[in-house]
Image (cartoon, coloured by chain):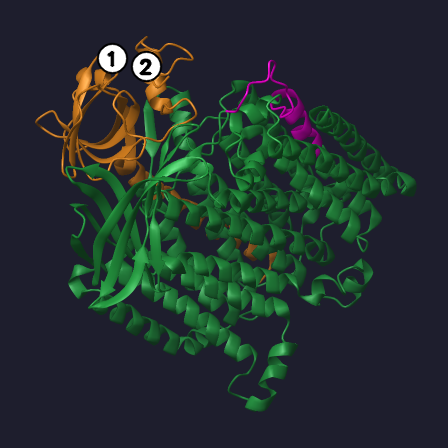
Amino acid sequence: MTRKQRRLYFVLLGMLALGGATALVLTAISDTLVYFYTPSQMAGQAIGPGRRLRVGGLVEQGSVVKDKANVAFTITDLTATLPVTYTGVLPDLFREGQGVVAEGRLERDGVFHASEVLAKHDEKYMPKEVADALKKSGRWQEGEGTKQ
Amino acid sequence: MIPETGQFALILALLVALTQAIVPMVGAARRDTAQMALAGPAALTQLALVAIAFAALMTCYVTSDFSVLNVVQNSHTDKPLLYKIAGVWGNHEGSMLLWVLILALYGASVALFGGNLPPALKARALSVQAMIAVGFLLFILFTSNPFLRADPAPMNGNGLNPLLQDPGLAFHPPFLYLGYVGFSMAFSFAIAALIEGRVDAAWARWVRPWTLAAWCALTLGIAMGSWWAYYTLGWGGWWYWDPVENASFMPWLAGTALLHSAIVVEKRDALRGWTILLSILTFSLSLLGTFLVRSGILTSVHSFASDPARGVFVLALLGLVTGGSLTLFALRAGRLQGGGLFAPISREGALLLNNVLLATAAGTVLLGTLYPLFADAFDMGKLSVGPPFFNAVFLPLMVPLVLVMAVGPFLAWKRGDLAGALGRLKFVFLLSLAIALAAWLIEGGTASPLWAAGGIGLAAWLGLGTLLDWADRVRLWQAALASLPQRVARMPRAAHGMTLAHLGMAITIAGITGSTAWKSEHIQVMRIGDEVTVAGYRLTLDSVVDDLPGPNYSASRAQFTARRGDRVIAVLHPEKRLYRTPPRPTTQAAIHTNLFGDLYVVIGEADGGGYVTRLYYNPLAPWIFMGAVVMVLGGLVSLSDRRFRIGAPKRAAALATGKA
């Protein structure tokens, strides 16, 4: 095998791997990307049921209803609201008035069926997406958060 | 006084690093031995100064000096001593100081143990190390100074994020950094070699031990983080393709590739340019990881900071290091032409395939990790790329990798015999099929997913193939059994290391497959005395005691008894804790393991006279972490190979003996 042949082999191998990876990425990305919406964005947009997405906002005060492992609550960005249901154990940091992100699907009845509820948090007790959304809707007081 | 000492030591360290960056580099160009020789003592002095700064910060934490802002923000007098010490790096500023400390540690080890290096290479490598140190010391001093004072000093501090108050904090970050930062060695040697215009087998021998050490530390660091997540998050998740996890995983993938390509350079003097490029990319990915985690661009327990100045600084540093080194590579790579020739079917060919697949995998992880950031930056909407993407893209790339991993060691250097190798593996193949089928049937046949059988089959293929290769090498069957220990001892340690590392990978694959495919999960409300059956274990909730005092929290502690038939297997005590400062709840799962699976018990909130409980059985979950430990053991065994210490030093000798 000459140097030239080997180089050709390298290039072919590299192209094959890259091509394969590109094909995998292209097929996967359209199905697996999960977009983030706030309740007001949801209200202004026709989102087909069955599409997997994330919604975020504050858990509305007094909206949490628990029935065994089933939970129903409303999230709000202080402009619009969205009813959410979830079955399972909520994260430790789930509280009324606190920011959450829920991942799941919007069903035909207009209720968001979450398969996951995240109360991940930074030091300000607020998911970044939610903080940005609140800033956008003009309801965010800098440095205040919701917890303090 | 102590914080000022620390600050002063850091400034001195910056000046020493500046000197170390410039003088030896100039000296190496001028062939001035005195100037080159400055690198060693400078590296040691730099370590001493950074260590003083680190010790100063630790003193502030241990004595709860609330006149220091960093201590106020992250500590509290109630905090147990372990977390006062480990809490030093449980925040942005302190963790950056740890980063620089470890960087200085590696530099000093080259100065101490690099006696056999050619003076010019050593001087240049230490100079490049110092340049990195200058960047990070400037970063600390200007944007993340841990020694800023708080005036007036408050009576007490804000405490440490309770999620971080776990023994894991003492080990996970230091090992992760030992890995991340350790790749700076390969980087510095690569840059030095590019400047020198000379990459050969001897170079690869000097670089390999450092890369191997960094790889071991990173593997252990990632495994510890994963295990920490597994027992602390309360749902048994050990990997979530979270951007911060990916940030540590990308350097691991690239570093693993580097480890293997360096072997080709050492043994066959081929793939030189590619190995240099990998060294640069691996460290760049480490820096990218630091940027992603430290810039506050991502939300997670790992991101402490959200000061834009810091993000811009690290990004600039990343651009400078990556851009600069790639430019140098582009200018000099032409000189690295040539090297040993080999056929596609050969040990080199298999290692190259390993490299291509690992690099592609790292690329796809990079894409998935950065895509949401770019989408956000270009206003394409907020989105997240989660486990479905990575599972769909990453796993298909790993399957051929693992398939080849078992075959590669059977191929000879230069030109291999694929048919012969596959012939040797015939029985391994059949046995793997049988194991996969058996696992599938035991776990319920059609009720169990088909890919799970595939995963177990892959693990068996890799594990058995690796064992067969080892048996071949020590001629297990050909010669007298009595001389076996001798033959095992005579085989190079690096070969044993490879066997262990590949076996570890097989164990981890089995663990990942089993715990993902056959996990049983039961979520329900249980009253005291209720019983739930999980994977054949009868679990009763015996009692729940509230308000148990801890050092800085109060806990509700439940007691579960696990029985198999009437035999008591284990008594488990999961807790729910409420910390005082900051006031936050955490979940402590209770785990009973029999090494083949974990019984995983979590107590939730009180609900109408009962408690929400989550009970899991995670089959083979312990294997995920045991496999990682075996991999690290393999790395350590390989690291102890005498070839890395004896024989490596002399470039001329290495050339004389040819392709030794």
**Which comes sooner in the sequence, label 2 or label 1?**
1
State the CA–CA distance, disc 2 to disc 1: 8 Å
The residue that label 2 is drawn on is A134
Quarter of the picture containing the C terminus of chain B is bottom right
The residue that label 1 is drawn on is A78
Callout 2: 10 Å neighbours few (<14), some, many (20+)?
Answer: many
Where residue B251 appears, x then y in whole percent?
53, 44
Amino acid carrying label 2: it is Leu
Q: Within the image, what quadrant is residue B593 found in? A: bottom left
Where residue B49 appears, x then y in whole percent?
76, 35
Colour assignment, chain B: green
- Left or right of residue B170: residue A106: left
Where residue B348 appears, x then y in whole percent?
56, 62
Residue B341 makes an appearance in the image: no
- As drawn, the chain in orange is A
Q: How many marks?
A: 2
- Where are the magenta residues, as a range? B132-157
> Mark 1: which secondary structure?
loop
Where residue B605 appears, x then y in whole percent?
24, 38
Answer whether labels 2 and 1 touch (C-beta < 8 Å).
yes
